[in-house]
Amino acid sequence: MKIALTGNPNSGKTTLFNSITGKIEHVGNWAGVTVAKKEAKIKKTLNRSGQDIIAVDLPGAYSMSPFTSEESITRDFVELENPDVIVNIVDATNLNRSLFFTSQLLELDIPVVIALNKSDLLKKKRTDIDIKMLEDVLGCPIVETVSTKSGRNGLSNLINKVIEVSGSKQEPPFIPVDVDLSNINSVEKSDIKRFDFIKDLVERAENRSYKSSLHNYQDGIDKVVANRWLGIPIFALIMWGVFSISQTHLGPFIADFLVGGIDSFYTFVGSILGSDVSPVLEAILLDGIIGGVGAVVGFLPLIMVLFFLLALLEDCGYMARVAVVMDRFFKRVGLSGKSIIPMVIGTGCAIPGIMATRTIKNQRQRRTTAMLTPFMPCGAKLPVIALFAGVFFDDAAWVGTSMYFLAIGIIILGALIIVRITGEKNARSFFIMELPEYRLPSFKRASISTLSRAKSFIIKAGTIILLCNATIQIMQTFNWQLQVVAEGAENTSILASIASPFAFILIPLGFGVWQLAAAAITGFIAKENVVGTLAVVYSISNFIDTDELVLISGSQDVASIMGLSSIAALSYLIFNLFTPPCFAAIGAMNSEMENSKWLWAGIGFQFGMGYAVSFLTYQVGTLILTGSFGSGFIYGLIVVLAMVSAVIYLINKGDKVSLNKNVKVA
Amino acid sequence: MSSFVETELNNLSKADINREYIIKGVESEDVELKNFLFTLGCYPGENVTVISDFKHNFVISVKDARYSIDLDLAKAIKL
């Protein structure tokens, strides 16, 4: 048996899905978190029927006529795939809007059960609903649910009802008469009648003790956080707080324990191997695998604390307000505030972020957002940020915060360039976004989401990153004649000879050595690899606790081993964050853009942007600090100027296009 | 068709805060957008209240929900 979960956006479908199936799909307190359908079996403890029930979680929709592509997934599924039962999740606090979709679902000849969700909020809002009466009029069973609660949440009742109605027939309460489906006006007239029917029904069934259109304390909060002048500083302060806690305070504190464990494991394995084992094997096992993977895993606590805090932010409803604040800026560059949602999701991982661009209606905006979302520092880039903040900038919270805002700056600049190139700078777009109610964020939900992200991080570390580090170690140990490279002749290794040509290109950016080039290259497989590869090529297994390194490597610390000035380090960090993302994210870009020209233009753009920003950071920074430009200035300047003139040429071409379009309109 | 000259209070961007109005029409060439607004309950004859005015952005209340809309959209909703 198959059941479809449908309902308005942010009615709690995915939360309910997670509760009845035990899955941990991403949830957030705003409209449009789910953009693809998800399937899973309902838990045995809830299902007494003996047969398997598959629940299908669908993106939210307001009606059967889709507005964006993810809404059409919902319509197509219920119309074409014949689910046995439709579970319609209705936000109990907004019957007036929700039941419009319900009345359409009831016409499909598939039994419907209504889950009257968020029913715990009714008491708070002093609203009574006559459920019996609603059931009688709508002709389908209604079960009160609270999907955010773990016990006494009405979910086992819901599943029992689903089993009960399966195969039965229900009479639709509202049947449109005399509608000409090919005529928009006729459809609209009928839909107005439908809304009137719902309004009349809700008026009879619902007893509200106060009007929802009155200004309340939540609107007061909005006045501050979405304020024209305060909005951005508040957002910056919140992000700084998130980084300060995860990177400067709580994160490193927890990380110290973990790193201690990895170090003892390293010593323990070393002592087991003894002195009889071949030095090559020892190097691969100790420095390649344990050292490289350990260096990456050492950052896990920092990432978990960060994800936890971001999950709390997502859960309380603040993110929708960020979209409102950003809309003003994004609109000037041809995007809309909706583009911020993929970018916020992209702080976890760029892939779901890029997928979330489906909620954007305009094709150019959607493609532009898919191209720019990977600039947002994702979870895999955090170890890189944390490493450089720790080694070169004394764990300062401003490093991470400024990388976020630099990302936003680059995104805005990028959008500006793209809108000019495509010649659509005069195109207008509308912005509308539902503002969900604020709620106290749940520690439990945030913990679950953090643990699931930590799990995939560890799996990645144990597979791709382990494999990469072992390969890097082998490539570093041998030369092309497959002989072990001698000490002092590291430049002859396979790795050095492959990475050196790339290093040459990176000289104007301040880090033209093969070790750093190799780390940047492995970053395209997975960004965590940057840290892993650096650990291997410099034989450093402990990046977190730089004090310990003094003991390990004499008076040297990580900064001097890597031989980078702080400016060059910042430039390297920027290069790794703002060049193209990992291959998996590029794949996601490909599928969402649906156009190879856009894809290649996007990758080229990301490279150019990363190169130019790091070039400027290194050269200008060096000029300020030392009074002269850094190495390779002229050479780099030529490259950057060539890229800039190419962009200017394309912009001019685009301006002509938009001029022509204007003439046509006039 | 009505003229595009904006008189006092003919669209939502000119509305008083916290006062209930009745929507007279939604003027947009974008049919899908009109349909979308319709499904939210934003259509002629329905009530709308402006909750906050952030100059570039408005918070409105339609059918027991809050939405943030931009200035262009506010101008398209006629009162």
Image: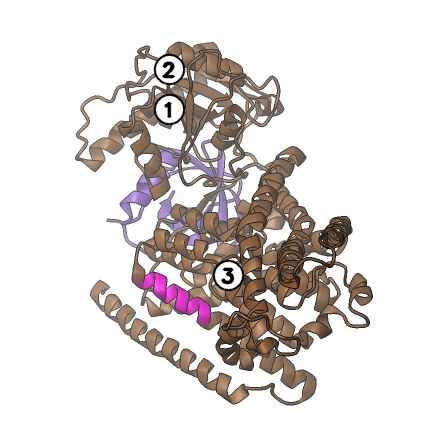
Chain colours: A brown, B purple
Q: Residues within 10 Å of mark 1 (few under 14, many from 20)?
A: many
Q: Does residue A395 appear left or right of residue A149 in this picture?
A: right
Q: Position of residue A472 (x, y in %)?
A: 56, 63
Q: CA distance from mark 3 to mark 1?
A: 40 Å
Residue under pointer 1: A102
Query: Relative to the observer, which residue lies in front, A640 or B54?
Result: A640
Residue drawn 28% across and 18% down? A109
Looking at the image, tell me whether mark 2 or mark 3 is earlier in sequence order. 2
Question: Is any part of residue A553 visible from this angle?
Answer: yes
Disc 2 is attached to a residue of which chain? A
- Which residue type does callout 1 highlight? Thr
For discs 3 and 1, the disc positioned in front in the rendered view: 3
- SS state under label 1: helix
Disc 1 is attached to a residue of which chain? A
Query: Relative to the observer, which residue lies in front, A640 or A172?
Result: A640
- Which residue type does callout 2 highlight? Leu
Q: Residues within 10 Å of mark 3 (few under 14, many from 20)?
A: many
Write down the quadrant of residue A666 in the picture: bottom left
- SS state under label 3: helix
Return the mark for residue A665: none
Residue under pointer 3: A375
Looking at the image, tell me whether mark 3 or mark 1 is earlier in sequence order. 1
- Which residue type does callout 3 highlight? Phe
Magenta span: A597-607
- SS state under label 2: helix
Q: Position of residue A206 (x, y in %)?
A: 49, 18
Disc 3 is attached to a residue of which chain? A
Question: Is any part of residue A11 visible from this angle?
Answer: no
Looking at the image, tell me whether mark 1 or mark 2 is earlier in sequence order. 1
Q: Residue furthest front?
A: A276
Residue under pointer 2: A138
